[in-house]
Image: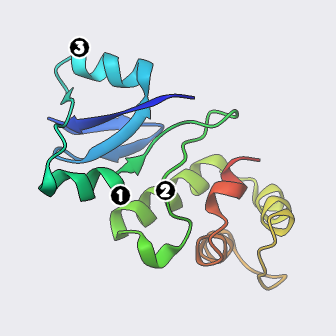
Amino acid sequence: MEAKYVLLTESITFNGAIIGEGEIVQLPIKSAKALIEEGKGITPVPDEKTAKTLEGALSLNTGDNGNPHLSPSEDPKDQTEEELSLIRKALDDKYKGGIPTLKEHAKEAGVEFPYDANKGEIIEAVITAGKAEAVLAK
């Protein structure tokens, strides 16, 4: 799926997550065009200052199952607290009331956690293991 970068001129909600004004996000082209037409974003012009920001832009491309790919990096050390918060929220939203399903998908992705772990602990284990995108894709 092709994508386009957008510099948000106001806060938006995307798949249940609030993305703040001034953030540069990578969206499917259709979503990016709609935001720009609504006046909620502009196409950023890469220069020395923004090139690095574009490289690390929050990717909100959706996968085949409609869940967002929340970051170009799977390593939680490379992610901001805001990105980690978005990932936590996406996992929490996807598995509302479905702890057995979350456990199953986390195990399939190779995440290790105690057998009696609660939902929050499993989500943190998924993030720490760098498997959030794999679990969200299930």
Task: Report the residue marked by disc 1.
Answer: 56
**Residue located at (17% from left, 44% from top):** 21
Q: CA distance from mark 2 to mark 3?
A: 26 Å
Looking at the image, is mark 2 or mark 3 earlier in the sequence?
A: 3
- Does dot 3 land on a helix, a strand or a loop? helix
Label 2 amino acid?
A: Pro
Q: Among all residues in the image, which is located at the extreme front?
A: 48
Cβ atoms at labels 2 and 3 below 8 Å apart: no
Residue 37: numbered disc = 3
- Does dot 1 land on a helix, a strand or a loop? loop
**Left of 132 or right of it: where is 116?**
right
- Does dot 2 land on a helix, a strand or a loop? loop
**Residue located at (60% from left, 40% from top):** 67
Mark 2, Cα crowd under 10 Å, few <14 / some 14-19 / many 20+, is some
Looking at the image, is mark 1 or mark 3 earlier in the sequence?
A: 3
Q: CA distance from mark 1 to mark 2?
A: 7 Å
Q: Is residue 125 above or below residue 26?
A: below
Cβ atoms at labels 1 and 2 below 8 Å apart: yes
Label 3 amino acid?
A: Glu
Residue 72: numbered disc = 2
**Left of 100 or right of it: where is 121?**
left
